[in-house]
Amino acid sequence: MIDDTTEPAAGSRNIPALLADLRSRKQSRTVRLTGSPGGTLHLRDGLVVAMETPAAPNVESLLLRSGRITEEAWSAVCAADTTHDRLAEELVAQELVGAGELEIISLSALFDAAFALSLSRPEGWEVTEPVPVLYRNAGITPERLVTEISRRTGLLAGGPGSVAEFARTRMQLAAPAQLPGAVGALPARHQDVLANTDGRRTPRDIAFALGRGLFAVMLDLRRLLALGLVQPTAPLTPQRPSTATRTPSAPVPAPPAAVPLPRRLPGRNAPTPAPAPPATGAP
């Protein structure tokens, strides 16, 4: 139970404000987000050390789905730490993954989950005492998280639909007859994405299948879209100019000038150029 002296300010209107409040008081807390997809944020001494959401692979998924460690090895690690409070230390101690590599994977999962969570608006949140979570990093400030989310969203912008719509769109091969000749020249990671593009999987599904981050898979799919090798199963809705600013927790760059904006000619709607009234005495 969190006492009144440490409870976050009631004025926290959104997640960035909440994290800033916890950061200013160096709180160690877990924040549970409700909504679709929802998720969990973990803070230690005011810094964000981990995020988890069904929308992106966590550290465990990245290690297992990529084949970095086996299911048997993971079970042994969990058995050695039944509280799940020292999973990172056990992974390193059992020499299943190096300390530096695990730190990179931990940060990658953190940023990827933050990006995935920024694509939808949470319905609410609950702040609790800290719960165990697998991580190995010194922690990230809320400001750095917002900056990185904005950078990633900007890199994926520019398509026919919003980044959020793209993340939940099923993808299919565009020209199967041309694939054999085109695939050979592609990097291995692109070939893996193509092999998992079957018309039923979204970028999220492909990320989980490959044990890779959602953002990285979406970048590869954007490239494959540009090459004409994949396509959405249904047309994406043309992006409106306001789409880029719909996520309050992660402001993104303004859309490019090529995006059509509502046309408004100077003076066209002003009252001064209106036609003169009829002459006095007219019928």
Image: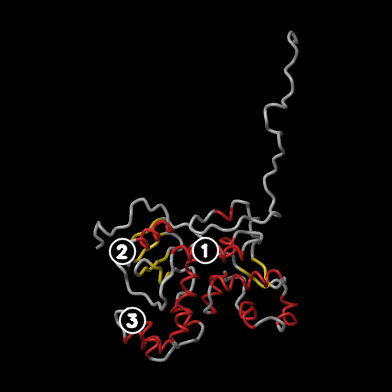
Query: Mark 3 or 2 closer to N-term?
Result: 3
Numbered disc in front, either 1 or 3: 1
Query: Mark 1 or 3 closer to N-term?
Result: 3
Query: Mark 1 or 2 closer to N-term?
Result: 2
The local secondary structure at tag 2 comes to: strand
The local secondary structure at tag 3 comes to: loop
- State the mark number for residue 128: 2
Question: Residue 10, position in %: x, y?
Answer: 33, 52
Q: Are marks 1 and 3 in contact (CB under 8 Å)?
A: no
Question: Residue 253, position in %: x, y?
Answer: 60, 58
Q: Are marks 3 and 2 in contact (CB under 8 Å)?
A: no
Q: Which residue is mark 3?
A: 86
The local secondary structure at tag 1 comes to: helix
Question: Residue 227, position in %: x, y?
Answer: 72, 72
Question: Residue 71, position in %: x, y?
Answer: 43, 86
Residue at horizontal 36 percent and vertical 66 percent from the top: 46
Looking at numbered disc 1 in the image, what kind of residue is underneath it?
Thr
